[in-house]
Amino acid sequence: MSPATPAAPSVHDLVRLRAEHPEAVAEAAARRKRRPLLRTADASAPDLNTGTGTGTGTGTGTGSGTAPGRRTTGSATGHPGRLMIIAADHPARGALAVGDRALAMANRFELLQRLCLALSRPGVDGVLASADVLEDLLLLGALEDKVVMGSMNRGGLAGAAFELDDRFTGHRPEDLVRHGFDAGKLLLRIDHEDPGSLDTLHAAARTIDAMAALRLPVFVEPFLCRRVDGRLRNELDAAAVATSIAIASGLGGTSAYTWLKVPVTEEPEDMARVMETSTLPAVLLGGEVGDDLDGAYKKWREALRLPTVRGLVVGRSLLYPVDGDVAGAVDTAVSLLQPGRDG
């Protein structure tokens, strides 16, 4: 089987393949065409991200049961030194809601179809997900020449009393190496009143050390947070975000392979000052944007002009846009990474 041939031609074939030939996951990982984390300005390799849609009204293609947007050779990426990553690690933490749709991400077949479409769009560099989702995408052939980022700590289940004792129940560093994946991501939420935060801090530091020993980038997503009426709330004011960045930057015995994954502050004009807290490279996370995706684009566009900000990692707002146009939402997000784009 050639590297370009998916082990499972459709999401429905996944069920049979997983049941009858579990070794297919390792085989697909061994065949996968890899790429550098960042494309350089002089990279001559063609981009394999061009999909079949036009970015307008393409929807998700959920009716046929086949993986949409099969890639063909296209033009160069258009944003050297930048990253556009689609995030889909929410379900492993029990976070299935999108807006007022409580179980929007519970349909795995639909999620995979949306992911395949998003990954097929020009300029999309890769995906962040838990092991089960990444292995589905591997079998579908959707991860060729993509950055594959494994989600590492998913034990802090959404809404649980132990949410801040966020155990590393997902990818281990050695799992990422074994599958030939390209990076890991960990969530670091800190509540000064919750002792579970200390356990998570300690585990995060040791994981950063392990990733550095393997020369694998690790994206740390830090928040200061607190409970309000029993529910966890992330603090997004400038002081809180700056403090969380300072704490995350200092974890581990080396920061050589550490990236930051940071939110835009509640007052977007504070981002320039906040991002001066660290020299580590950073990507912006999407978070919950509600119905105001245009407002989110504007905030991301401004923050992407800052010197340490190197890209976007966005999930639900692009995979489940209010208007249903996944390709259009993704294409607009990609356009924000273009140099000199003021749109």
Image (spheres, rainbow, N blue to C red):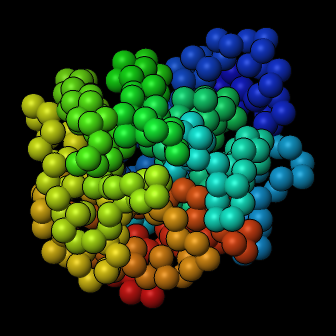
Position of 101 relative to 35 (above/below): below
Residue at position x 22%, y 71% from top? Answer: 238
Residue 32: give x, y in percent of width and height: 54, 29
Comparing 54 with 113, the one in front is: 113
Relative side of 175 to 116, left or right? left
Q: Position of residue 236 (x, y in %)?
A: 32, 67
Residue located farthest toward the bottom when viewing the structure as drawn: 343
Q: Is residue 151 visible?
A: no
**The C terminus lies in which quarter of the figure?**
bottom left
Query: Residue drawn 46% across and 31% down?
Result: 155
Residue 155 appears left or right of 132:
left
Regarding residue 303, the answer to whether it shows in the image is yes
For the N terminus, which image quadrant?
top right
Q: How many marks?
A: 0
Q: As drawn, which residue projects farthest toward the front?
A: 229
Rendered residue at 61%/35% (across/down): 133
Seen in the image, is 48 located left or right of residue 313? right
* Above or below 17: residue 290: below
Is 244 placed above or below 235 here? above
Query: Looking at the image, is 267 positioned above or below residue 9?
Result: below
Which residue is pictured at 23% across the width and 78% down the height?
270
| Displayed quadrant of residue 255 | top left
> In front: 218, or 53?
218
